[in-house]
Image (spheres, grey):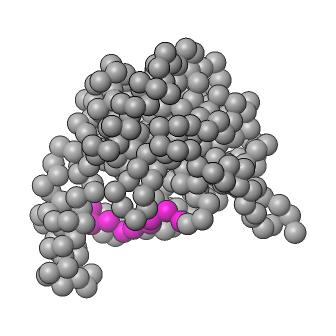
């Protein structure tokens, strides 16, 4: 069994515009102020409007992009709810801002919501023990440790204030969006309980960062869980995803978060 890539949508959407990648699913991009300079987000038809999967990071540029999208692309088609695949700021960063601005509810897995909430409520903890000692014990010098703690972790703080309540997404439970039923799948390794959405009717799965076309997601042992095995969790999650989708008679390739690629399995 070998994997081949079929890039069905080789040209990404321009800022503020969208590309239809499946029936009732639109693909947008939000900018990131890093070398990896974008994150893909999705609009899923939900009655008269759209449910939003992921939001982009909390920066002025992303807020301005959303203001333009709301006034242009989505004029007359309101957002109905905010879904977050996982706790990383490029995915959940503007969830709270959009929820407050548009009076919407947040949907997320419990672990991802609590991880994001912990960082948002106590960002100073990232620059304290036992985190500082974690980096020193693993070979970073004092100067580099200071650089990581004071600049490198700034990314984790780029999250708007989260709603104090949320709707929990759990593995194998159904989620109805716009009259279609999505199965909630979860995976670990890149984050603890990352949410993916499988639409049996449409034959596609929205994988967020769990499955990526050209690169692998970041898999890191983190200071908060210094004896963890995230790589093992990630590989087990991929195996379970493949087995589960095969069992579900997966008919169409994945729509992945970081590219427009579709992933197909073919025998050789």
> Where 44 falls versus 121 (above or below)?
above
How many numbered circles are shown? Answer: 0
> Where does residue 49 sit, x and y in percent of width and height?
52, 19
Residue occupying the point 38% across, 38% down: 65
Main SS category, magenta section: loop
> Where does residue 33 sit, x and y in percent of width and height?
34, 57
Quick one: 123 or 80, which is closer to the camera?
80
Report which quarter residue 181 is drawn in: top right
Magenta residue span: 216-224
Q: Farthest right residue?
A: 268
Give the left or right position of residue 105, taking residue 46 as reference.
left
Q: Is residue 221 magenta?
A: yes
> Where does residue 183 sit, x and y in percent of width and height?
61, 34
> Where 180 falls versus 151 (above or below)?
above
Evaluate whether residue 19 shows in this view.
yes
Evaluate whether residue 172 shows in this view.
no
């Amino acid at each position: 069994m070998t994997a081949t890539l079929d890039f069905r949508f080789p040209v990404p959407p321009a800022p503020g515009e969208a590309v239809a990648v499946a029936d009732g699913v639109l693909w947008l991009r939000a900018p990131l102020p890093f070398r990896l300079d974008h994150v893909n987000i999705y609009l899923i038809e939900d009655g008269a409007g759209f449910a939003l999967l992921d939001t982009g990071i909390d920066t002025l540029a992303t807020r301005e992009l959303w203001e333009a999208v709301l006034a242009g692309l989505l004029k007359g088609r309101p957002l109905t709810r905010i879904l977050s695949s996982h706790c990383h700021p490029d995915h959940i960063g503007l969830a709270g801002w959009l929820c407050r601005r548009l009076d919407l509810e947040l949907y997320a897995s419990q672990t991802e919501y609590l991880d994001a909430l912990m960082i948002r409520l106590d960002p100073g903890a990232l620059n304290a023990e036992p985190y500082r000692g974690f980096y020193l014990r693993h070979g970073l010098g004092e100067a580099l440790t200071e650089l990581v703690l004071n600049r490198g972790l700034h990314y984790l703080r780029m999250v708007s204030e989260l709603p104090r309540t949320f709707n929990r997404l759990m593995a194998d439970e159904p989620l109805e969006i716009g009259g279609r039923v999505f199965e909630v799948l979860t995976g670990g390794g890149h984050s603890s309980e990352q949410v993916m959405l499988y639409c049996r009717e449409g034959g596609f799965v929205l994988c967020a960062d769990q499955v990526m076309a050209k690169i692998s997601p970041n898999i890191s042992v983190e200071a908060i869980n210094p004896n963890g095995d995230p790589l093992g969790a990630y590989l087990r999650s991929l195996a379970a995803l493949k087995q589960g989708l095969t069992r579900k008679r997966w008919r169409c390739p994945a729509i992945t978060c970081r590219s427009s690629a579709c992933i197909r399995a073919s025998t050789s």
